[in-house]
Amino acid sequence: MPTPDINRSGQLEIFVRVIEAGSFSAAARALDMSPSAVSKLVARLEQRLGTRLLQRSTRQLQLTPEGCAFYERGLRVLADLDEAERCASAHAEPRGRLRVNSNVPFAHHFLLPLLPAFLERHPQVGVDLMLTDEVIDLLEQRTDVAVRAGPLKSSSLVARRLGSTRMMIVAAPAYAARHGLPGDAAALLAHNRLDIGHARAQTGWPLREQGQVQTVPTGGNARASDGEALRRLVLGGAGIARLAAFQVQADVAAGRLLPVLEQANPGDMEDVHAVFVGQGGYLPLRVRAFLDFLVEQVDLAKPLA
């Protein structure tokens, strides 16, 4: 039997740390090593594999296609080791940094109110949170979990469904006082229809009239970077927008916003998922704990803020 290479898992963990930290120096600080030692270990790993994993420049590190595949599979291997150790120890706890990306509306109405309870439940886990409605590359951004709304594109990512929410067209009373409210889809075309600034899978508002669903294009004088900024514009009376019900139901109940063309609402739902790299059986304990917490706590029909 050949002598086992006891350094393979160590090299793999250092490589993963470099990708997550974004540089050799940052990984070296986290590992209490010198940058040159970290760089040499990664170079030794590349030499053993016979392929380049990283493109190095003075400004950034970038994964090669081989490095990207190795990183993704390496995460699974390390997670499997974590799981083996967890099974061997009844007292193992989730630990480490958890990098989370979330669309802005979900973060404001669910994630931010819930995070203190998660951190209290798992005191050895730290969370780095980034909010954006743009779809990010989890590997490139070194992200453990991303929360996304709408249809998922086919990818190597795995998803856990957190629920679904209906969509609503709304306007502020101040806007209605100045411009009135549309009575049908044709009348809606004369109104200021605000939207998100980045590309979305659906490029208009579906409305059902006379048994047929038609799509009304957006066409306003303002666009926002995210759903919560769009909601603020609508609250200020800037125009009409179509938003997730969980974002606006408290505003509607309080009279701050008015439903528009609810009789023509087709009742379409928007799914919300937590997406992550790797199969469910190969997740770091901190990622699994966070996903289980979200599934347990999130009810899209009952926003927390």
Image (cartoon, rainbow, N blue to C red):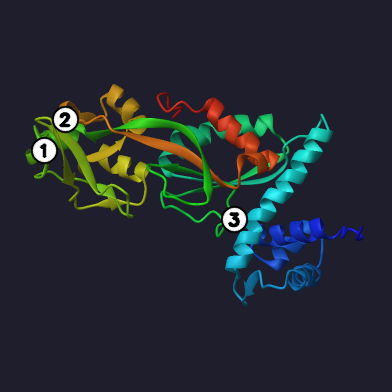
Residue 264: which disc?
A: 2
Q: Secondary structure at mark 2?
A: helix
Q: Position of residue 274 (x, y in %)?
A: 51, 40
Q: Which residue is mark 3?
A: 142
Badge 3: residue crowd in 10 Å (few <14, some 14–19, many ≥20): some
Is the C-beta separation of discs 1 and 2 under 8 Å? yes
Q: Position of residue 220 (x, y in %)?
A: 19, 50
Earlier along the polypeptide chain: callout 2 or callout 3?
3
Specify the quadrant that holds the C terminus. top left
Q: Give the Cα separation between the discs numbered 2 and 3.
A: 42 Å
| Extreme-bottom residue of the structure | 58
Amino acid found under the numbered disc labelled 3: Arg
Q: Give the Cα separation between the discs numbered 1 and 2.
A: 8 Å
Earlier along the polypeptide chain: callout 1 or callout 2?
1
The residue at 87%/60% (across/down) is: 5
How many tags in the picture?
A: 3
Badge 1: residue crowd in 10 Å (few <14, some 14–19, many ≥20): some
Left or right, residue 289 beside residue 231: right
Residue 212: which disc?
A: none
Earlier along the polypeptide chain: callout 1 or callout 3?
3
Badge 2: residue crowd in 10 Å (few <14, some 14–19, many ≥20): some
Q: Secondary structure at mark 1?
A: helix
Q: Position of residue 35 (x, y in %)?
A: 77, 69
Q: Which residue is mark 1?
A: 185
Quarter of the view holding residue 25: bottom right
